[in-house]
Image: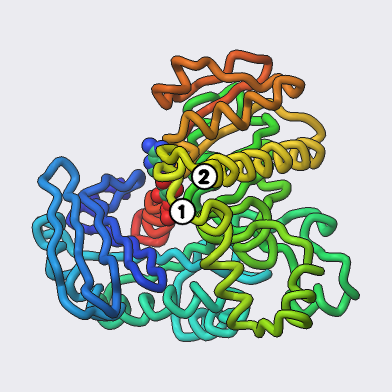
Amino acid sequence: MGARQMSGAAILTINAGSSSVKFSVYEAGEEPVELGRGEVENLNAEAHLRVAPAGGVPGDEPIGRADHAGALRAILDHLAPMLDGRRVAGVGHRIVHGGAHHAAPQLLDDTSIGELHALEPLAPLHQPYNLAAVNAARAAFPDALQVGCFDTGFHRGHAWVNETFGLPRAYYDRGVRRYGFHGLSYEFIAGEIVRRHPELAGARVIVAHLGNGASMCAMHAGRSVNTTMGFSALDGLPMGTRTGQIDPGVLLYLMEFEKMDAAALTRLLYKESGLKGLSGISNDMRTLEASDAPEAAQAIDYFTARIRHEIGALTADLGGLDALVFTGGIGEHSALVRERVCGGMGWLGLSVDAGANAENAPEIGTGRMRVLVIPTDEERVIARAVARFLPGG
Ligand code: ADP
């Protein structure tokens, strides 16, 4: 009945970063049907709009020097063929930080937007851009519902020991906690695990989301128990350009003896480290895999060693393990990384079939442990959340 009421309605999802705005568009309904997706890249410079209508011909065109509002206008101009007469009834936004109190998706109005602005110090590199896009979307679609979906939300409800640092208690009360990120991806994967493998509904699963940003999540019966990212999106695994876990004593040393200030440390930890810093070649796993340089091999070794280390730690949090899931650009496509991770963990029952692994097959394990490859789709999680707020949803 809901589907009939909503016919003619569409859902737009927006994922705004510092230099790009990704979008996707769906026909509204209990399970939204994708009509297309795309991205504006290189904001505030020579921006480009790439569009991929579902089943249509992808396009790529320069749109000049666009900011977030300009990007949204360009997206809007190109939506018509995909909307095909449908009205945008709801816009869903990926919001990186919901803090301690915003977990479930929620309507964005002046009050909730104000509360989310107050969280900007917790995610200064992302939250302001997310909220700039909300502002632009409210102006562009004044009659549509605006819905915020939080990357931290999936991890709320962790045991206190997995949320705190060993600092004096007052810091926890002031919000210095382990929040965790990539929650929209983990929510999608949790749903896919049950849809594809109902027998794993109550299982202990580790999901490795390995993209430019990378983290892992320990789940029990589809709920997050612990995750490798913490207060910021820097902790845990090394990433394309981010350090991952680091002894905080290193930061004290760099401040005191190399006179680095917050801006210099931010640049070092977020932009110059990880695969890029270790290899001195690239942040891109494809480039590193294709390289003969020993530094490229070492960067991959460090990445996979840290993943194995975190599998051990998260398995301890879960009290055992039933399945390991790979997702994200690297997790979905790099047979080398999956082989390196599982190859060193036969003791845990992890091993992969070389042929299935080379084909990025959905199930690649040969040992006692299930090993799955599941493509993630954060946009769909946002679209589903918006659909629940629409009339009949
Ligand atoms: P983001 O976190 O920006 O969404 P993605 O999930 O798209 O990133 O992942 C990007 C990473 O995936 C890059 O390091 C890229 O090299 C890697 N990747 C994509 N395809 C392959 C492939 N076929 N083999 C190895 N790595 C790949």
Counting from the top left corner in percent of width and height, residue 1 is at 30, 46
Is residue 245 visible to us here? Answer: yes
Amino acid type, mark 1: Ile
Residue identifier under label 1? 281
Label 1 Cα neighbours within 10 Å, binned few <14 / some 14-19 / many ≥20? some
Q: Is residue 81 left or right of residue 24?
A: left
Q: Is residue 117 above or below residue 181?
A: below
The numbered mark at residue 324 is none
Calculate the distance from the C-alpha at mark 2 to the C-alpha at mark 1: 7 Å
Q: Position of residue 267 (x, y in %)?
A: 55, 74
- The way the protein has been coloured in the rendering is rainbow
Is residue 329 something that shows in the picture? no
Q: Which residue is identified by label 2? A: 296
Name above or below for residue 379 compared with residue 202: below
Say which of 132 and 228 sits in front: 228
Reply above or below: 33 against 244. Answer: above
Q: Position of residue 16 (x, y in %)?
A: 38, 69
Identify the residue shown where x is 39% and y is 22%. Answer: 359
Name the amino acid type tagged 2: Ala
Q: Residue at x 50, y 21 (%)?
A: 363
**Mark 1 falls on what kind of element?**
loop
Query: Cβ–Cβ below 8 Å for labels 2 and 1?
Result: yes
Q: Position of residue 264 (x, y in %)?
A: 60, 80
The residue positioned 60% from the left and 63% from the top of the image is 233
The quadrant in which residue 71 appears is bottom left
Q: Give the mark nearest the N terminus, 2 or 1.
A: 1
Front-most of 11 and 217? Answer: 217
- Left or right? Give the position of 351 relative to 133: right
Residue displayed at 67% across by 47% down: 224
Extreme residue toward the right, this view: 168
